[in-house]
Amino acid sequence: MNPSPFLPGTEPALYDTAALQALDSAHYLHPFTDFKSLSATGSRFIVRGEGIYIWDSNGNKIIDGMSGLWNVNLGYRRVELADAAYRQMLELPFYNSFFQTSNIPAAKLAASIAGVAPDHMRRVFYCNSGSEANDTIVRMVRRYWDLKNQPQRKTIISRHNAYHGSTVAGASLSGMSGMHAQGDLPIPGIVHIGQPYHFENGAGMTPEAFGLHAAGWLEEKILELGPEKVAAFIGEPVQGAGGVIIPPSTYWPEIQRICDHYGILLISDEVICGFGRLGSWFGCQHFGTRPDLIAFAKGVTSGYFPLGGVIIGDRVADVLIESGGEFNHGFTYSGHPVGCALALENIRILQEEGVVDQVRTETAPHLARQFHKLADHPIVAITEALGMVAGLVLAPSPQTRFDPADEVGMICRRHCFENGVIMRAVGDRMIIAPPLVISPQQIDEMIALIRRCLDLTHVELRARGLI
Ligand SMILES: Cc1ncc(COP(=O)(O)O)c(C=O)c1O
């Protein structure tokens, strides 16, 4: 018999954390987790959210500097989103789109997404997550080239340190060595080139020169493989899980030129950047590329419901549609009416409240100004910010780096958690992606907390003799 997780007769905000932790470690295997070490420490339970704040089961209030997992873009407790889901659940909780049937929210949402996507992208294929979106893209790209009578064009080029999901194809497209080491990945037909990380790989080059240089790795790979064998290139406009790697301004235009030159498809994985995160509806619009396929998920529902999909440009859609023949792919929950109704409401709010414009013109510039002030901290080597993402590198000095084995990012992350702000650690990079609705005052509050946690990290690193 499991112990009850609730203390009898107490306020709903008070929980028996130890009992919850026991329940959790007895039964729940978490994603991307060392099961053994988590069961030794116990999980932290998040029990409530409102706006940019979340509360844990011990009553601590925390600024969610990561918008959940880059997705709670409108913040927590938006009643309109919950209402939209509730109303749709009563009206029609589910029907499939397989056998020449459809549902109203799915059709309306596809039109709504087409309305904010680049002009040449007018069709939407639904699934439930970013990983499924990228799996769908792999199948769609191969189908496209088969229909074009070029079945030898199979290879998709991705990048090291990219993240495109955790299904077999998603993990293969991802460029994470830890993921590839488990399960003999990547699958055949997926190869990787270097990432446009100027701080790490661009020594001696200006960011602009490095951007062209890094894009050149794509051309080198295409020529090495044989252009007639290359199907597509995939990239996140800004690499998220890889540590908020913001490419130099020259990078994406040169990637577009190379894709055009060799006739290969360009895939923009907008699972993080889509729906306003960079201050544009899609990241490709910020960087000026013209993708053939866009993967989306996360922010389409502000994370209130699992929904993902692919936006398909005319070049691919025309072939898929005009050729006829069934595309043998889809999911039970493709076009789920509840998720689609909720996403429609999410997009309506983004539009009517002018959230994307507000990010671009007001809050993102404020975030950048305030975040860059952290560059004067003794353990910060660089700061970078774009839209509602930002990252800094922890280092003993601008010229030296910490030993990865010392896991300084995890030390800093712990101080953040314990002091009321969520930052994510990716090696020695500390990153944030706050809700798009964060106000300038709340940005100041968040930055002040981050500075305090950097101070605490500094003290601990000194005490451990790491600086
Ligand atoms: C760029 C990108 N693509 C794909 C995914 C996978 O999405 P999901 O976790 O919904 O499968 C993620 C998740 O973080 C992501 O950041």
Image: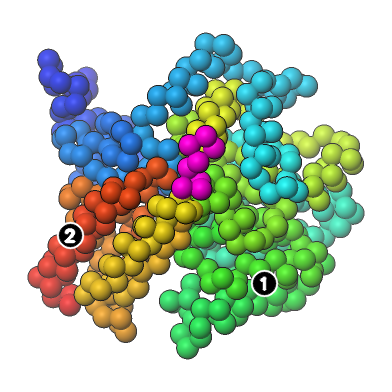
The residue closer to the viewer here, 147 or 356, is 356
* Residue under the point 71% across and 21% down: 102
Image mark for residue 432: none
* Residue under the point 66% across and 20% down: 104
Instruction: Report the residue marked by disc 1.
Output: 254
Image spot of residue 184 (x, y percent): 55, 57
Residue 210 higher or lower than 428, as above or below? below
Residue bounds of the magenta highlight: 351-358
| Kind of residue at disc 2 | Arg
Q: Is 130 part of what is drawn in magenta? A: no
Mark 2 or mark 1, earlier in chain? 1
Image spot of residue 405 (x, y percent): 28, 70
Whether residue 139 is visible to the viewer of this picture, yes or no, is: no
* Residue under the point 36% across and 45% down: 438
The residue closer to the viewer here, 237 or 25, is 237
Whether residue 105 is visible to the viewer of this picture, yes or no, is: yes
Q: Which residue occupies the extreme top position in the image?
A: 90
User: Which quadrant is the N terminus positioned in?
Assistant: top left
| Kind of residue at disc 1 | Glu
Instruction: Report the residue marked by disc 2.
Output: 452
Q: Secondary structure at mark 1?
A: helix
